[in-house]
Amino acid sequence: MIFCYSPKVTGQFTFVGASASYGSWIKEIGGSVYAIYSVNNKIDIVPNATYFIPHEEIIETQLDSGKVTYTWWSANLDGHYVVFEKSIFQLFGLLGLNITNETKLEDYVTQGQRFKYKTKTTKPALNIGAGVQFQLSKFFTPFVEIKYVLGERDQAVASLGVLIRIAPDRESEEY
């Protein structure tokens, strides 16, 4: 005798979006892109990526002159869990994984000789946070998200953006 179990899968990509973000350790703004895969009415899987504006430091001493340029990007795989929903307002908790890449380019002259060094580091981290979505229309949903990235360089990241619906609402779960 063979038993088969085939659960009804209701998950689908429901939104794509973009946001402006700010990193407290990086101290720069960035642009983020989002996709939301809705597993059910309470749980979403949210892959997203952010590219921060490069940061430049000028070096001027009696012996040295030049600059150091930092660039960062991060990729995240977050899970959202809806903890409160009322009318157009939806509050969610956030937990996820983060990978942050930092590139440091040093370009300077010391004692008349030019030096250029480029180093890259990629570090994993964990995300924890919360956010709010405001479903103002059927197709556009503004949101605010704040997460803390726990890793080698801890930082808070605040994002303000908009989501665009790409699929209809999920069917209600049936058992």
Image (tube, rainbow, N blue to C red):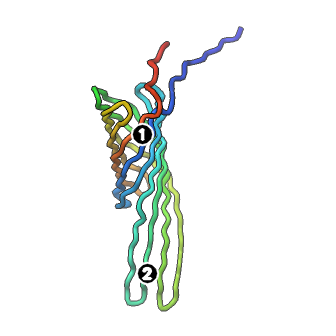
Is label 2 in contact with label 1 (beta carbons under 8 Å)?
no
Circle 2: residue type: Gly
Q: Is residue 167 above or below residue 103?
A: above
At x 29%, y 30%, the residue is 88
Residue 109 image position (x, y, % from top left): 47, 85
Residue 136, above or below 62: above
Residue linked to disc 1 = 95
Q: Residue at x 33, y 40 (%)?
A: 142
Give the residue furthest to the top. 1
Name the quadrant of the N terminus: top right
Q: Residue furthest right?
A: 1
Residue 40, horizontal then vertical, whole percent: 45, 25
Mark sitting on residue 66:
2
Q: CA distance from mark 2 to mark 1?
A: 41 Å
Q: How many residues crowd around disc 2 within 10 Å: few (fewer than 14), some, or many (20 or more)?
A: some
Helix, strand or loop at disc 1?
strand
Q: How many marks?
A: 2
Q: Amino acid at mark 1?
A: Leu
Give the x, y percent position of residue 27: 34, 61
Q: Residues within 10 Å of mark 1 (few under 14, many from 20)?
A: some
Nearest the viewer among 135 and 48 is 135
